[in-house]
Image: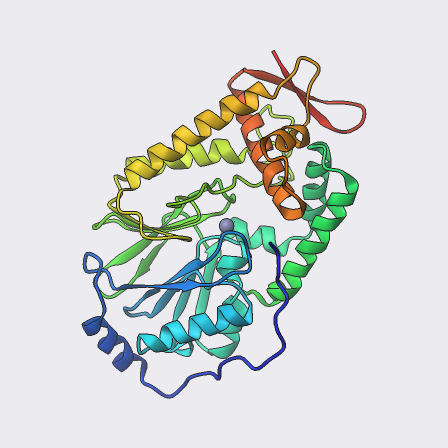
Amino acid sequence: MFEFMRAESNPLPAQQGVPRGLAVGAILGAMRLQDTLPVETLPIPTPYGVGQVNAYIIASEPLTLIDAGVNTLAGENALKLGFAAKGLFVDSLDRILVTHGHPDHYGLVPLICNGSGHVKAYMGEKEIERIANTGPVWEWSRRLQEAGFPELLLKEISKLEKRVNRVHKVSQLKCRPISDGEVYEFRGFNLVAISLPGHTDGHMGFLEPDRRILFGGDTLLPHSYPNPLIEPILEPEGDSPSRRRHSLKLYLETLDLLQSLDLATVYPGHGPVIENPAETIAYMRRHHSRRLDRVCNCLTAGGVTAFDVSATLYPGAESYCRFLAVSEAVAHLDVIVEQGRAGNEIRDDGVEYFFRL
Ligand SMILES: [Zn+2]
């Protein structure tokens, strides 16, 4: 699933020399307008199980890209060819808005920024902190040990993480922070940044309030469920003993927020445009409700670990997929404890057990 290594061959040459205003003007006249919002979708291949990731060109002024695709040669070529097919140039970009700090969404940001003197990239404040701060990495591995993750698998995952950071040039990633409610102006409309925690803690969406159009990243997907990932926190919140975000609880609250926005259209991070967001939101709720019941059925009086639950839910998952499966189990177990349907304790072996009440 994780094939991050970049092939050592020549990428497409940088394209230069066409006045930006002219190119944008031409595309505004020729492209399909979605409720008068000048959006072009660029599907970019990824080496991951999720398949293609969507980058979106907002062909207005300033010329803006929402999400950037993965830093592979195939990803870079798809981005450049996608721009060229629409009479635009990557080097002409003024602004990149990143929905969240996963490599399929931010991977090409350093490369784009290195190729252009003026483009500015933005990402949620918490995402920048999470990617830049090495402290929580240790917390993250402790959280996985608590979940019952075997040491051997943990080493494998850490190696993958280091490889991701190297391939995606994380040290070169320079983003300005986005905070909730920040407004990004275009000619004739605005996009408002809204905080959508769940899939990651600092996940942002970009809302065009008049047309109720959302660029939702991985918050609402047409064909799959965004994984509520384990994320450590340095200070536990409230009376919860766990030092991790309650990702699914946050995600379910985000679904409430999305529902209240009465969205007309969602441009997702993967897959086709969602034309009936209310239906997708309801579907996500039903999925998690059923999954909560299924996880509850895995509980015993003596206690099980999140790793045990993940093995029941996804018996064949290996390597990074096992991490995703354990994240899924932990997120649901946290909600079940909060609902009063299970108890939890960290025992002498340092592992957290969940038991039927
Ligand atoms: Zn993601």
- Vertical order, 31 against 117 (above or below): above
Front residue (pair 249, 182): 249
Quadrant location of the N terminus in the rendered image: bottom right
Give percent across and percent down for residue 188: 21, 63
Q: Quadrant of residue 24?
A: bottom left
Give percent across and percent down for residue 8: 63, 77
Quadrant location of the C terminus in the rendered image: top right
Residue for point 51% across, 43% down: 201
Residue for point 48% across, 56% down: 51
Q: Quadrant of residue 222?
A: top left
Which residue is at the far bottom?
17
Give percent across and percent down for residue 124: 48, 52
Which residue is at the far front?
316
Which residue is at the far right?
348
- Vertical order, 310 against 192 (above or below): above
Q: In this view, does 13 lie to the left or right of 189?
A: right
Give percent across and percent down for residue 288: 45, 30
Residue for point 47% across, 35% down: 250
Residue 337 in view here: no
Q: In this view, does 140 lie to the left or right of 43?
A: right
Question: How has the structure been colored for display?
Answer: rainbow
Residue 305 in view here: yes
Residue for point 44% across, 43% down: 224
Front residue (pair 263, 47): 47
